[in-house]
Image: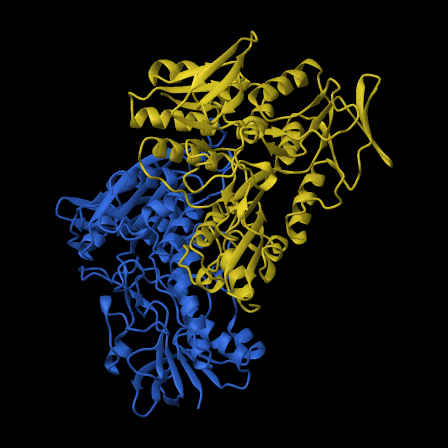
Chain colours: A yellow, B blue
Amino acid sequence: MPFLVIGGDAAGMSAASRAKRHRPDLDVIVLEKTADVSYSACGMPYNIADPSRPIDDLVVRRAEVFRDKQGIDLRTGIEATAIDPEGQTVCARDKEGREHTFGYDKLLVATGAVPITPPIPGIDRPGVMVLKSLAHGRAMKDFIDRHAVRKAVIIGMGYIALEMCEALRVRGIAVDMIKPRASFLPWMEEGLADQVRAEVEARGVGVHPGHRIGEIVQQGDRLAVVAPDLTLEGDLVIVAAGIAPASELAAAAGLQTSVAGAIAVDARQRTSNRDIYAAGDCADAFHVVTGQRTWIPLALRANRAGWAVADNVCGIDRRLAGVVGSAVFKVFDLQVARTGINADEARAAGLEPETVVIKSRSRAHAHPGASDIWVAMVGDRGSGRLLGVQMVGRDGVAHRLHAPAVALHAHMTVEQFSLTDLGYAPPFGPTWDPMLTAANQLLKRL
Amino acid sequence: MPFLVIGGDAAGMSAASRAKRHRPDLDVIVLEKTADVSYSACGMPYNIADPSRPIDDLVVRRAEVFRDKQGIDLRTGIEATAIDPEGQTVCARDKEGREHTFGYDKLLVATGAVPITPPIPGIDRPGVMVLKSLAHGRAMKDFIDRHAVRKAVIIGMGYIALEMCEALRVRGIAVDMIKPRASFLPWMEEGLADQVRAEVEARGVGVHPGHRIGEIVQQGDRLAVVAPDLTLEGDLVIVAAGIAPASELAAAAGLQTSVAGAIAVDARQRTSNRDIYAAGDCADAFHVVTGQRTWIPLALRANRAGWAVADNVCGIDRRLAGVVGSAVFKVFDLQVARTGINADEARAAGLEPETVVIKSRSRAHAHPGASDIWVAMVGDRGSGRLLGVQMVGRDGVAHRLHAPAVALHAHMTVEQFSLTDLGYAPPFGPTWDPMLTAANQLLKRL
């Protein structure tokens, strides 16, 4: 009986490939409802920014390679419709509407996530688009070219929204951003969020948080996003209002779900059924800092979880560490990074957070290329533990973040982190790196 | 009785300043033999590279500020000549040759390090220079201008030698480097050291390891560094053959010394005498990875150790973590970084090292600005522990190093490090950061 995988993106194809490497004799079948497998979804905004690059540049490995070189029975254009855990079968439907049934010995559900489309009248109009799959990226890029888009409205202000904002501005397209919630980046310390907002506004982008969207209407050649006190016109409307785990199939089969409806898994990526695993954006994870289940859908975790499933399916006991919630993105020249939890999340987890926000420099005093860098650091008053770090700056922010991420995995206190021996040279930081300065300041308050 | 500090550089002035902040009433006296206090020694090569910047740009805080604003009794141009631990006094001599005696309650020895001058005939000729103090930097910069230096020879190939090599090339000065030992960067994995050497040679620098220097002679207007089979001419000869701890004063007073003759201190920076502390380049430290004493003179440690002394002197019990040996430098466009120990050091410490060297990319597949990055990672076969990491590349190397440095502090295994949740976005790395790829590869061999 085969190892069956539902979903041929990061988690699914990582698992399938690694299982085949471990056991070339294993029958590995992957069911993918679209035509695309193994592409860099995270690279889409950067690809869309560059009209000279075809979208298929983002394909890391083509379906033929998985089939011919790796011996994976990869079936595209076929969508799983039901899982029968008792009978150990999966029903699926191909593009012609034919039904198929696949038996399995072990099953991996790697169905990913779906973009959230808020119930706004007119959200289904042509020219209102989301960005999640490669097909979405292809459609958006085609639309921009075909309609010679000059002006766009983005609904949402998360990191996909901000990356798309940059991509469109790079192409000379005017951008307005709008969302109902009043706070620009609600998870971020205000002093840092202000820097991000200033960077976006400095590029001529209209930033309009706190506007409930009533409808999207056609206005001549253009669309208009209409709020009670604001109407924003555009040739293109991008809905980047977040994503949700694609867990309906798993839930319908009686598998346990948790935070945000994600499929609940243990450290081996096993669901509540011992023969069914889940991995990637549809699965939850344990948060190292809170010890609680969380849902943070990101690419590294998807790949890693896919590998862990392959190991466990092939008899190699593999338990993953939890996540610490590290995320980085770039918006124009600004690097934005976070790891761990913020003060609100800490309070919700029953901790006593104390926060400092410091501003320092990315390189040594008087060294060319030095720029400002802001660090927010959160510690727990009771235990002295480091809980989280946020950083914003133009120089060396994204890679600096790795240090507190590792410290969180190690359950370090703020004092222990403050005493770490970080490399120093003038082109790369002040003697006291901004992260150490933040830790030194925070220590005084704990 | 005062808190007396011998040496007014990083460790000494950090300690003096912090002690005054803790206890404004405390009598703090600093004896500094030169005229310069509190400058960025690490910034000297970058300052020398730029003829438009005065060397005094490197001064972080002037003597008057310490005296007038901070109330520190800072005495420059006075050299400590003997410590009497029994009588708790220090003898010193001023520039006029007058003797002075200072009593102390607590003493900090922060005498720093001295450049090693190999016993080469002719090493005392005018135009043969070292670079350690600001006075050295000033003299070298003046010499380059006054003699319109066109060609230089650097004896040594350590990181100061390489930074000076870059500084001189930036000013259009031709450079040859020479040293007796055959290996270019002996502490570095060969595959990585080769990249550094290639970068230096690509800038037209002559790299000549494995040549024992017989003498330095005057040849017309120029100096010549003469080895049996090679003679290198230059207007300037820089001796960058390493540094040694300036511990004679402490040793003469009977204080215990250790590795390389550095002053032995405990986690509180206290020497073998309970009223005498040592900090900065003259003091040793514990190595977190080996658990043994080590001597790694670097700026961050000096500042941190100075603070710890001030805390302990003022009754705040402060114990420092050991060092993990993190060091970074830049040579032309290449970033070079190390943390922890290499395979030779691991074997010397009784461990069973296993090493991998991998080449990856600094940014995602197909992302603009991506370049090669090399990672060498060392783990212990017995325990699975991570022992050290070296990295070379043009993009994002220096700050990436912070992650394994923190992991070493936490005594992580290679597997634990391989499972850390590092932030990922296409402008900043592949989905699997090069460090994680190295850890994944190393895991297979442990």
Give the residue drawn at x 61%, y 21%. Answer: A136
In this picture, residue B339 sits left or right of residue B381: right
Q: Residue, x 36% and y 31% (percent of image)? A: A313
Q: Is residue A413 above or below residue B157?
A: below
From the viewer's side, name the closer residue of A237 and A264.
A264
- Quarter-of-image position of residue B129: bottom left
Residue farthest to the front? A86
Tell me: A114 left or right of B258. right
Q: Where in the figure is residue A294, as x and y percent of width and height?
A: 55, 44
Residue B7 seen in render:
yes
Look at the picture and state if B47 lies above or below B439.
below
Answer whether residue B365 is visible to the viewer in this image. Answer: no
Q: Nearer the viewer, residue B74 or A412?
A: A412
Between A258 and A403, the one lying in front of the other is A258
Give the tally of numbered discs: 0
- Quadrant of residue B10 in the image? bottom left
In the rendered image, the quadrant that contains the N terminus of chain A is top left
Q: Residue A26, percent across and down? A: 32, 22
Location of residue A210 with respect to B271 vertically, above or below: above
A269 left or right of A354 in image: left
Most distant residue in the left direction = B228
